[in-house]
Image (tube, grey):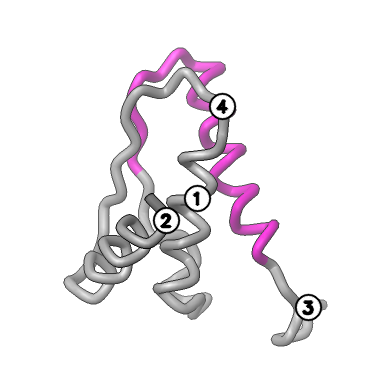
Amino acid sequence: MHSESEDRTELLASCYRESLRVADELGAQTVAFPAVSTGVYGWPLPDAARIALTTVRNTPTGVREARFVLFNTAALDAFRTAYHSTA
């Protein structure tokens, strides 16, 4: 059981790294991600966007293009802000 105050940043980052690892195994050149854990699990969008973008940028991979497929404008805004602040 996890406490709400437990930092699970590494767990979320691992989701993206493992997805890229599988994409490499399959020889995929492109991948698409949702805003993982921001729906039912309620991970705050700004933090999730920062983790997603930082992890995908910093993970060595043969994937040439990663897209984030987002549900609404709030998610898009969070990812745009994170993109500009982590570039």
Callout 1: helix, strand or loop? helix
CB atoms at circles 1 and 2 under 8 Å apart? yes
Q: Amino acid at mark 3?
A: His
Residue drawn at the location 33% of the way across and 56% of the way down: 83
Vertical relation: 63 (above or below) 32: above
- Distance Cα–Cα, label 1 vs label 3: 24 Å
Which residue is the site of mark 3?
2
Which residue is the site of mark 1?
54
Residue drawn at the location 61% of the way across and 37% of the way down: 18
Which residue is the site of mark 4?
60
Residue 66: percent from left, percent from top: 34, 36
Horizontal arrangement in the rendering, residue 21 relative to residue 32 (left or right): right
- Distance Cα–Cα, label 3 vs label 4: 30 Å
**Mark 2 or mark 4, which is nearer the start of the sequence?**
4
Q: Nearer the viewer, residue 70 or 79?
A: 79
Q: Which residues are magenta?
A: 9-32
**Mark 3 or mark 1, which is nearer the start of the sequence?**
3
Q: Quadrant of residue 29?
A: top left
Q: Which class describes the residues within 10 Å of circle 4: few (<14), some (14-19), or many (20+)?
A: few
Residue 84: percent from left, percent from top: 31, 58
Callout 3: helix, strand or loop? loop
Q: Is residue 80 magenta?
A: no
Q: Amino acid at mark 1?
A: Thr
- Distance Cα–Cα, label 4 vs label 1: 12 Å
**Mark 2 or mark 3, which is nearer the start of the sequence?**
3
Q: Nearer the viewer, mark 3 or mark 2?
A: 2
- Distance Cα–Cα, label 1 vs label 2: 7 Å
